[in-house]
Image (cartoon, rainbow, N blue to C red):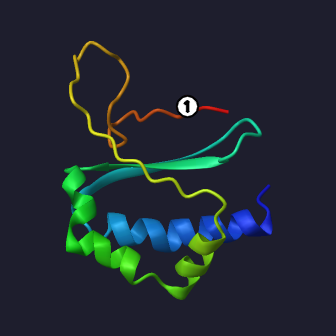
Amino acid sequence: MLTTKSATRSDWYNNEHVPLRMNHLQSFLAGARYFALDSQIPSWVALYDVDDTATFSHNSYVRLRANRSPREANLVKRLSILDRQTCELVMDSGASILTTSLASKNPSRGIITSGKP
């Protein structure tokens, strides 16, 4: 069951955040959001496949953050954690049965993360 806060975040995420990226920026190839199964914080993570990490310095993306809607600006201001990280696939041996892309025909239903307490 979603709380009012999480329902508001989900509505913003599903109906504003994702469409602005996936429907308007060709460099965004796929995305997925995962919710934590434990009580640790953060309770969710969003991952995106982009065609080039330089995407995040392109004007089309920078404009999205500079011209946030009032709803998004208010929500982002209230987030307890906002940690953006950029990673790049350097090599794929092809030997793994795991996918390296969220856009695959069989994306993973879950991920395992690890961090410092």
Q: Nearer the viewer, residue 20 or 107?
A: 20
Q: Quadrant of residue 105?
A: top left
Q: Nearer the viewer, residue 49 or 15?
A: 49
Q: Is residue 31 left or right of residue 6?
A: left
Q: Which element type, helix, strand or loop, lies under badge 1?
A: loop
Counting from the top left corner in percent of width and height, residue 76 is at 57, 71
Residue at x 60% of width, y 73% of height: 77
- Residue at the image point whose x is 39% and y is 84% from the top: 67
- 14, above or below 38, in the image: below
Q: Residue furthest front?
A: 116
Indicate the position of residue 3 as horizontal and vertical percent values.
Answer: 79, 63
Instruction: Name the residue beneath numbered marker 1.
Output: 113
Q: Amino acid at mark 1?
A: Thr
The quadrant in which residue 23 appears is: bottom left
Q: Quadrant of residue 88?
A: top left
Place of residue 1 in the rendered image (x, y in percent of width and height, measured from the top left): 80, 55
Image position of 94 (left or right of 8): left
**Horizontal and vertical percent position of residue 78:** 66, 71
